[in-house]
Amino acid sequence: MGVNKELYERYKAMKAAKLAAEGNNNTSVSGFKALSAAQASAAAHSTSQVQTQAQQPIIQNNNLNNNSYSNIETNSGLQQSTSVESYSYSSSAAYQPDDEVRENYSSQFTGMSETPQTINTYTPEPEKYTGNVNTTYETNIPSTYKFALIGCPLDHSLSEYIHLAGFQSLGIKATYELIETPPEKLVDTVKYLKTGGYSGFNVTIPLKLPITMFLDEVDPSANTVNAINTVLINPQTKFLKGYNTDVAGFSKAIPQDIDLCGKTAGVLGTGGAARAAIAALAMRRVKSIKLYTRNVSNTLELLNYLRKTYPQIEFNSFPIERIRDLSDIDMLVNATPIGMSSFGAGYTPVEEQELRTLPPHALVYDVIYNPKKTLFIKLAQKYHYRTVTGMDMLVHQAVEAQKIWTGRTPDFKDMKIAALENI
Ligand code: NAP
């Protein structure tokens, strides 16, 4: 069984268990009692974004970093005693595309022959570029690079603004289209992207897992998260390689002076963002991770996987509604949708009374980026805790995507300003 299929099967099993538990879970939960699981899940979906045949970034530069995930982290100065590959449960051997899997996926849907609709396209004017243009281009590189975001719905996505600002900072002429793609259109959209001269694309809800069936290779960065959010298209072979940049995005947003080695982290939620946080915290060599969830028994499979994958870390799960004392937590992460502007903006996943039991040095991190400051973050700041917001993670994951596509590092500040101006 190839890496992609394994990833897909594992995800399907976890999702089924999660859905079953959500259906049976009537427990009221502290801080977000009024929110149903269905509402919360819908909200997460509405605003969440989303090697052996080595693929090269599309733009060659003499100062290129190796764009493997472990090297990205090492280049940023993080101390790592173990490589990312040693954490991953599956090998990074080349994946042979599995026609059977693709056909099964396709056969679930009908009427897939339409050309995907681009809902928004913007081509920046070349003369406006101010970034570094001293780049050595491959001879077959087009004058304008084409990138896209696929998923559904995409109406509120900030990706277009963030990525165009990044390309502009690099002096790269590029388009970034939003291609609204419900699952039944995924087959056509992938074909369109492969034949339409695209260099890469981002993937968001609900395609972060289904896209794996169309990939020729999966980067180890996607293993723990079980989701792909960035794809690189090889310009010559049209091979697709998938990555997850949320892990690096999460890690890069942590202030540089914070050393998490040997520390205890608390993670609220067990979904995609939570798993990205866990993978990043493992790379930062935390000693222990406490998962806070609505249904502890539902996390057993995840706990088994995490204990096997990261044997040096102690993992435990606790009911989120019973949080009382957080005095042993050095970093608390909200990876639930509680507090998002689309619905529970006035809610917090941890009540004020419990939040203030954190030790004074604790770091409080919310992966939510809209609103810019959630109630959770406001409460943490009220008690003078250091905080990190989801906006930094969002922009950092986009920076990582551009590093994969171009081999160069775009300007974080320009990209963050573009995001803040358009939120
Ligand atoms: P997800 O896969 O649906 O996971 C959300 C998790 O939150 C669930 O697994 C659940 O964990 C918990 N949860 C959901 N509803 C809840 C409720 N009513 N009460 C308590 N817990 C609840 O979603 P996701 O993709 O991880 O996204 C989560 C949030 O992160 C969203 O707001 C999204 O926009 C944000 N996000 C931000 C970035 C960024 O770059 N800043 C990236 C990705 C996601 P349990 O089932 O264990 O309780």
Image (cartoon, helix red, strand yellow):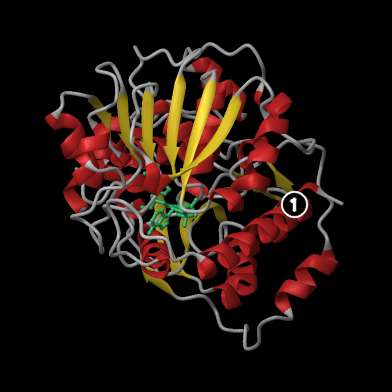
In the rendered image, which quarter is residue 53 located in?
top right
Residue 69, position as x, y percentages in the image: 59, 29
Task: Identify the residue at horizontal 44%, vertical 27% (top origin).
Answer: 265
Residue 286, position as x, y percentages in the image: 52, 19
Task: State the residue in front, 114 or 104.
Answer: 104
Label 1 sits on a secondary structure element that is helix
Can residue 79 be seen by looking at this rendering?
yes
Task: Please tell me how many numbered marks the rendered image carries.
Answer: 1
Query: Which residue is the site of mark 1?
Result: 4
Task: State the residue in front, 291 or 197.
Answer: 291
82 lies left or right of 170: right
In the rendered image, which quarter is residue 39 located in?
bottom left
Task: Identify the residue at horizontal 65%, vertical 19% (top origin).
Answer: 312
For this orientation, the residue located farthest to the bottom is 111
Specify the amino acid type for callout 1. Asn
Residue 287, position as x, y percentages in the image: 54, 18
Q: Is mark 1 within 8 Å of ligand 1?
A: no
In the rendered image, which quarter is residue 184 located in?
bottom right
Q: Is 34 situated above or below 57?
A: below
Task: State the residue in front, 227 or 395.
Answer: 227
Can residue 136 be seen by looking at this rendering?
no
394 lies left or right of 184: left
Q: Is 9 situated above or below 59?
A: below
Q: Is 378 situated above or below 72?
A: below
Task: Identify the residue at horizontal 22%, vertical 29% (top origin).
Answer: 356
Label 1: few (<14), some or many (≥20) within 10 Å?
many
Residue 223, position as x, y percentages in the image: 66, 41
For this orientation, the residue located farthest to the left is 382
75 lies left or right of 298: left
